Amino acid sequence: MERISILIVGSGPAGCTAAIYAARAGMPPLVFAGAQVGGQLIQTTEVENFPGFDRPILGAELMERMQRQAIRFGARWLSESAQKIERVDDFFVVEGEYTTVEAEAVIVATGSVARWLEVPGEAEFRGYGVSGCATCDGFFFRGRDVAVVGGGNTAVTDALYLADFAQRVTVIHRRDTLRADHSLQDRLFQKSNVRFMWNSEVVEICGEENPRKVKYVLVRNVRTFEISECAIEGVFVAVGHIPQTKWLQGIVGLDDRGYIQTQGGARTTCPGLFAAGDVMDPHYQQAVTAAGNGCRAALDAVDYLRYRLGRE
Ligand code: NAP
């Protein structure tokens, strides 16, 4: 079994930045990059708010550049996800799908995954009209009527993307104001083929079995409790995220929503285990804050190895 100084789990902006900093500090890490190399940003279209890019850059391109930058400094990449972690004396044994490594320090940057509505019909029609990724599946709904559920940045970004080729986009939101950034909201309000169902919750997704496809959603007005039918063929769910921490249960302190608890920088309740990005940040969840956290995690991990373990 290979023994390494730093293992980074996750390859979004947090994991990539941690890899760049650890490698440049003379401790080139191994990265378990996960099934989705590049994290959630590769599902995004244009990124407009990452400093240094005065023109929008595609999320996938930004992540490819970060990965190349880390590899240039000596980081190694494996396309697998961590399944299990165990602390043995002063190191960790981490099992991926195919590879098991011993690491003296671990940086967890596993991000989060889309939350679902958990209403009848959602699981049944997933992949047949229900999607959690507008940029992946939006193309199939050219000229059709679709709905986006949610009011945050993801929902508004998805609705903007879909408005360019769907016939009509209905944004279904449980309140009467959006949570998304005002610059995004302003752009959405200008779209002539976007309408809003305010104070509304999807209670059921309905459709046909043969062939399996969505025909409409049942929507409840949260004020009047009235239920109405909204005819659409695609439902894009954008109601937030859940941190990917199941594999860490028992080894590190998590908050009541499952986010890793950190103390001053990237340190966690488990010495030698550091956290960065959406997996420890329920609030900001931006590419740039994740990258900043990744930098802190790498510096903290290098510091831990150099001084706590008496290196150098
Ligand atoms: P979010 O900001 O947590 O928004 C989730 C939205 O879904 C909220 O509007 C929420 O309603 C609604 N919601 C939550 N649970 C629901 C349920 N069970 N039923 C119906 N609606 C529900 O999540 P996000 O939009 O995925 O964004 C996550 C983070 O990524 C944010 O920090 C965001 O700024 C960032 N992000 C940034 C960009 C960008 O900068 N361009 C793009 C995408 C994401 P309420 O408003 O009533 O709570």
Image (cartoon, helix red, strand yellow):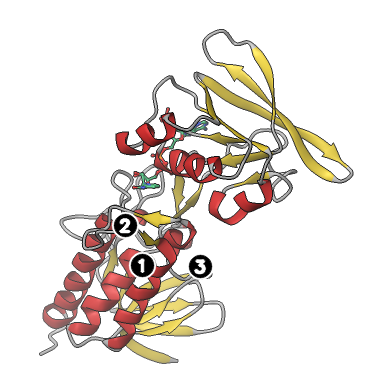
Q: Amino acid at mark 2?
A: Ala
Give the quarter of the figure containing the N terminus: bottom left
The residue most toward the top is 224
Disc ID at residue 287:
2
Q: How many marks?
A: 3
Disc ID at residue 43:
none
Residue underneath mark 3: 36
Q: Where residue 82 sits: x, y (%)?
A: 48, 72
Residue at 44% of width from left, 57% of height from top? 245
State whether residue 248 appears in this view. Answer: no
Q: Where residue 200 sits: x, y (%)?
A: 54, 21
Is residue 309 positioned above or below 51 on the image?
A: below
Question: How many angstroms separate mark 1 from mark 3 (CA)?
Answer: 14 Å
Occupied quadrant, residue 221: top right
Callout 2 secondary element: helix
Q: Is residue 26 left or right of residue 201?
A: left
Nearer to me, 18 or 105: 18
Q: Given contact means CB atoms under 8 Å apart, are the residues at marks 2 and 3 in contact?
A: no
Is residue 258 positioned above or below 21 on the image?
A: above
Instruction: Estimate how packed mark 3 is, as few (under 14), some (14 to 19) or many (20 or more) residues with alpha carbons within 10 Å.
Output: some
Is residue 157 positioned above or below 86 on the image?
A: above
Q: Amino acid at mark 3?
A: Gln
Q: Where residue 260 sits: x, y (%)?
A: 33, 54
Callout 1 secondary element: helix
Residue underneath mark 1: 62
Give the quarter of the figure containing the C terminus: bottom left
Instruction: Estimate how packed mark 1 is, as few (under 14), some (14 to 19) or many (20 or more) residues with alpha carbons within 10 Å.
Output: some
Q: Given contact means CB atoms under 8 Å apart, are the residues at marks 2 and 1 in contact?
A: yes
Q: Given contact means CB atoms under 8 Å apart, are the residues at marks 1 and 3 in contact?
A: no
Q: Amino acid at mark 1?
A: Leu
In what quadrant does ligand 1 lie? Answer: top left
Residue at 86% of width from left, 46% of height from top? 211
